[in-house]
Image (spheres, rainbow, N blue to C red):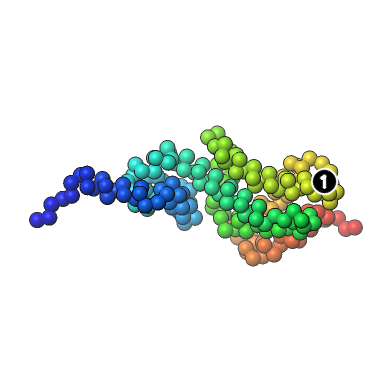
Amino acid sequence: MTSMPKPETREIRETRPYHHGDLRTALLASAERTLREKGVTSLSLRELARDVGVSHAAPGRHFKDKQALLNALAETGFERMAEALEAADDPALPFQPRLTSFARAYLGFAINNAELLELMYARKHEPDASEQMTAALDRTVGSLERVIGAAQQQNEIIAGDPAQLTLTVGAALHGLAAFTANGIYAPDAALDAVEELIHQLLHGLKPR
């Protein structure tokens, strides 16, 4: 008759995944998959541990609770979005094509990460949001405000509070992203609409 493994042997087998990679990264990747497929309410540290293949207590080394996990997931989302926006930005371009490129990058991220984006905007208002999340958020909103500020310095757009102009442009872009997430726009149609949206923002709707 085969004997049962000793308790210490079972523990070694359960904790072995600690040694084969970055557990925090693996947990965040699993959390994002769950978020996409099942929604935020289905996220739990115990289920993530089972999915990654570690003991149920292992995630506690990186996230004290589910709220900490959600904050970390939102923070990584802002970091990725900032990288996408920075890669799309070309300061050498005139303002309209520069802003159009920036807008397409934002909308592309929003289309490909709709569930994550919703979590990102929800978590940034939480009292326990980290300083790192605030800094990552500044890289996204701040990058748009810097684009607008540079255009003001070049007299390409009106003077005024850059933050207010950023709010106007950001609201239009996020509105288009929300329409796409809700099925009002197909993703390709939304991306095709970006150039006209930017044109209308810059030139207004009144006939000239």
- Percent of width and height locating residue 12: 26, 47
Which quarter of the figure is the N terminus placed in? bottom left
Q: Which residue is mark 1?
A: 153
Question: Element at badge 1?
Answer: helix
Q: Is residue 136 shown left or right of residue 37?
A: right
Measured as percent of width and height from the top left, residue 137 is found at 62, 43
Identify the residue at the far left of this view: 1
Q: Residues within 10 Å of mark 1 (few under 14, many from 20)?
A: few
> In the rendering, at what x and y percent does residue 3 appear?
13, 52
Which quadrant of the rendered structure holds the C terminus?
Answer: bottom right
Q: Is 13 positioned to the left or the right of 159 in the image?
A: left
Q: Nearer the viewer, residue 15 or 99?
A: 15
Figure quadrant of residue 145: top right
Residue that appears at 69% across and 47% down: 143
- Kindly identify the residue that appears in the image at 43 percent across and 51 percent down: 26
Whether residue 168 is visible here, answered yes or no, is no
Name the foreground residue: 63 vs 172.
Answer: 63
Q: Amino acid at mark 1?
A: Gln
